[in-house]
Image: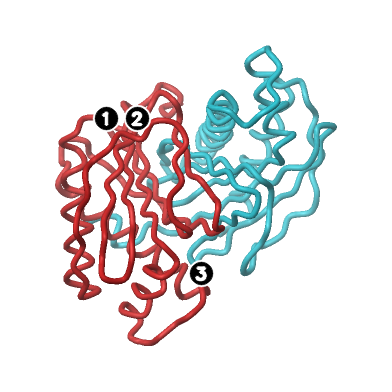
Chain colours: A cyan, B red
Amino acid sequence: MRAEYINPFIASLSKAFRTMLGCEVHRGPLALTVGKTQRHGVSGIIGLSGNAVGMVVLSLSAEVAKKAASAMLLCETDEIDADVIDAVGELTNMVAGAAKAELVGLNLMVGLPSVVTGANHVVRFPSNVTPICVPFTTEWGDLALEVGLAPTPAAATI
Amino acid sequence: MRAEYINPFIASLSKAFRTMLGCEVHRGPLALTVGKTQRHGVSGIIGLSGNAVGMVVLSLSAEVAKKAASAMLLCETDEIDADVIDAVGELTNMVAGAAKAELVGLNLMVGLPSVVTGANHVVRFPSNVTPICVPFTTEWGDLALEVGLAPTPAAATI
């Protein structure tokens, strides 16, 4: 994946947190995801397709997921319930939707978000795709953004 | 989600297992997925977008995942390694790719597969989408297919 493709996702995540959630995020170093990586307890996943195929994974600690949902819904929540799942899915959708608008040449469409929970879950990409992972810290806790994009395979055009 | 949309996915899963893996699958009753459901240890996830947005989740027991990878790769494997992850991703891609060819009116494109591992993970859809889940049994163990499709939201066309 070309490194410049990650920048619109970083920008859209920062903007979504700042403008919608009132929370500043602080970016850590970019890293290529090689092999199995352990991330956080709640992962929003959304697919991209068009002139490339890809996947965006927004991985939040449970605390960040609950705080983000509370900020979006304007009410406190202290468990990972359906409202938190919807909020994480919507946040993932917004990050992917705003970023794709910047990646005009790829002509991307955004899929439906799903949200994975489970303390020890790991989201892995195909081995021929090396996603880029960006860790962030916030006053609420940690999160990570992972984006993998690959040329559209022949199988996707059947 | 309209119930008839599930049939091409059931057919493509059955065909992929029979022709590529040499394994017959036996379908259980369709069910709407309401709330949190616990499925199997390895989930292949792939997004769909077009005139609808959706997600396909192929959830396999670890045993089925390893046996499927062994059949695809023509060699035995006894751990969930990168080869098994790739095989589950490719299987998910094939199920989604063959089904979308039948759903012509939806003009779907298939994204990049990701594979989630972790014994207690749960994959959840947004609460305004009620996916249809189909359990299957095989000689290797159990699996489940879950498909959620929704009208393309305004957010996806930004």
Q: Nearer the viewer, residue B40 or B89?
A: B40
* Residue B59 located left or right of residue A71: left
> Depth-wise, is mark 1 or mark 3 nearer the camera?
1
Which residue, as the protein is rendered here, is positioned at the far right? A139
Residue found 48% across the figure and 59% down from its top = B41
Q: Is residue B93 visible?
A: yes
The residue identified by callout 1 is B1
What quarter of the picture does the N terminus of chain A occupy? bottom right
Judge whether A7 appears above or below B90 on screen: above
Where residue A28 appears, as percent x and y from the top left, is 80, 49
Residue found 68% across the figure and 53% down from its top = A39
Badge 2 vs badge 1, beta-carbon distance below 8 Å:
yes
* Residue A78 located left or right of residue B40: right
Question: Which disc, if any, is residue B130?
Answer: 2
Chain of residue at mark 1: B
Quote the CA–CA distance across marks 2 and 1. Answer: 6 Å
Quote the CA–CA distance across marks 1 and 3. Answer: 32 Å
What quarter of the picture does the C terminus of chain A occupy? bottom left
